């Protein structure tokens, strides 16, 4: 008898991807054939793991649901289930507006999902996942929720208060991933700077990354989303001395003008931000900082925006992304402020920041020509092998396009001499 087929479609962030991977492994243990983001049809069931963060992401999730509603009407799929952040936040509205979905599940309803499909939920398999990324890297979600009160962010309303996982649990999961061939671990959370405080009474991130680095098979550990307020400075000497910890520090600063930071409820000033950056650079020589900015926040003046542009020019972040502000239901900002800047102004300001960053990235990349970097090979594409340095995270940062007369294996670490540079990507060859 053929196995029933299930397609799991993941929208949004890497944290959602981890949730999908956990679900997929449970379903495989229930004797289902499980695919991820498949374009095929003829599925017995489809699960859509949605994002509910900002307007564009919500709309993309809704569009995906409606596409599969049509597929269900055509008979291309059987059951249609929707899970994740969107129903966690808007379940009643969704059930009313899109009743064709067979059942909605919230973000933390894993047991209810497997019960729906008559799969036995076995706690001893809690660390198992069906890896959907290339097999040499994987995300490790260290916590759920967020205790910060940023005025623009809806995440705490969706995920609740911060809940750290124990160091022991995370080490066990990483050991499982390493046995699967994972060499690069990307620690993710809404806020790594808060890790451990809720269960240990203090930040334990430094201890966590030290323990993970001791596991055989793990060669790179990358940190994503360190909140700048109450930054865990104890991680800096660990990053400096431990070669397995990538000198890659992801700190979403969001803005630099004090008036905007105050309205965002970031609880940090420009002066404190500059001291933070200075200390990171001093304590971890060679470290790069990745950050994100939000433009078009309510009542962001031309002066505020010019201050942000000048800060970006002067600081020369190695990695920077920018988002136009999105007025989100239920947030402090949506209640306190009018969304007084047009989409045109927001998009124009985002474009200006990225033009500045493009020039900075091009200048910094030119300085890499002639240097040798340790690179992990992600794939082969046409005539090039594609890899990343420790300063580049998958999907969000630049890549190294490598010429080699010999075959390079996916997941292999090689020393690459940089021979050319574009605005964001590098060209190199084997030593």
Image: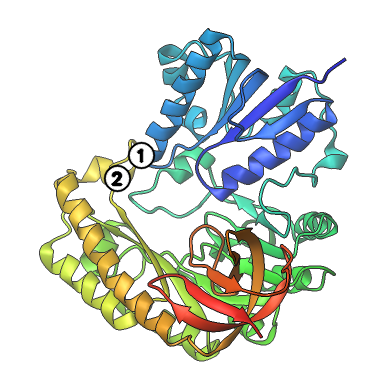
Residue at 51% of width from left, 62% of height from top? 225
Task: Tell me, for residue 56, which label it has, or none.
Answer: 1
Query: Of label 2 and label 1, which has the lower sequence position?
Result: 1
- In this view, the residue in front, 262 or 293, is 293
- In this view, the residue in front, 152 or 292, is 292
Residue at 63% of width from left, 34% of height from top? 108
Image check: 13 left or right of 204? left
Image check: 409 left or right of 231? right
Marks 2/1: CA–CA distance: 9 Å
Q: Quadrant of the N terminus?
A: top right
Q: Position of residue 86 (x, y in %)?
A: 48, 31
Image check: 397 left or right of 253? right
Q: Position of residue 238 (x, y in %)?
A: 66, 81
- 196 to 235, vertically: above or below: above
- In this view, the residue in front, 205 or 390, is 390
Task: Tell me, for residue 326, which label it has, or none.
Answer: 2
- 158 to 270, vertically: above or below: above
């Amino acid at each position: 008898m053929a196995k029933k087929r299930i397609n799991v479609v993941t929208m949004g962030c890497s944290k959602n991807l981890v949730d999908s991977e956990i679900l997929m492994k449970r379903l495989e243990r229930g004797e289902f054939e499980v695919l991820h983001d498949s374009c095929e049809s003829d599925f017995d069931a489809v699960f859509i793991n949605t994002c509910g963060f900002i307007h564009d992401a919500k709309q993309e999730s809704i569009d995906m649901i409606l596409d599969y509603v049509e597929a269900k009407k055509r008979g291309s799929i059987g059951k249609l289930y929707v899970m994740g952040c969107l129903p966690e936040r808007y379940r009643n509205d969704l059930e009313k507006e899109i009743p064709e979905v067979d059942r909605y599940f919230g973000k933390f309803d894993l047991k209810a999902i497997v019960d729906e499909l008559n799969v036995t939920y076995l706690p001893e398999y809690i660390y198992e996942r069906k890896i959907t990324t290339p097999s040499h890297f994987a995300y490790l979600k260290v916590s759920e929720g967020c205790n910060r009160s940023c005025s623009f962010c809806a995440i705490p309303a969706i995920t609740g208060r911060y809940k750290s996982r124990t160091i022991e649990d995370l080490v066990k999961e990483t050991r499982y991933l390493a046995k699967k061939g994972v060499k690069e671990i990307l620690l993710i959370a809404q806020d790594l700077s808060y890790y451990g405080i809720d269960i240990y009474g203090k930040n334990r991130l430094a201890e966590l990354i030290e323990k993970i680095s001791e596991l055989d098979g793990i060669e790179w550990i990358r940190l994503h989303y360190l909140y700048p307020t109450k930054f865990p400075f104890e991680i800096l000497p660990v990053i400096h001395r431990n070669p397995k910890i990538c000198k890659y520090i992801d700190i979403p600063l969001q803005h630099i003008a004090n008036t905007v930071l105050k309205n965002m409820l970031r609880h940090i000033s420009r002066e404190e931000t500059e001291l933070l950056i200075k200390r990171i650079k001093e304590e971890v020589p060679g470290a790069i900082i990745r950050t994100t900015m939000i433009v078009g926040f309510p009542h962001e003046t031309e002066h505020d925006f010019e201050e942000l542009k000048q800060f970006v020019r002067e600081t020369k972040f190695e990695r920077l992304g920018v988002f136009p502000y999105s007025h989100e239901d239920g947030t402090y900002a949506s209640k306190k402020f009018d969304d007084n800047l047009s989409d045109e102004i927001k998009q124009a300001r985002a474009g200006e920041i990225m033009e500045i960053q493009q020039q900075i990235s091009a200048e910094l990349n030119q300085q890499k020509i002639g240097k040798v970097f340790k690179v992990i090979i992600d794939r082969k594409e046409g005539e090039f092998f594609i890899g990343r340095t420790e300063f580049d995270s998958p999907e969000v940062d630049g890549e190294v396009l490598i010429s080699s007369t010999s075959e390079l294996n996916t997941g292999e670490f090689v020393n690459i001499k940089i021979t050319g540079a574009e605005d964001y990507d590098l060209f190199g060859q084997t030593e």
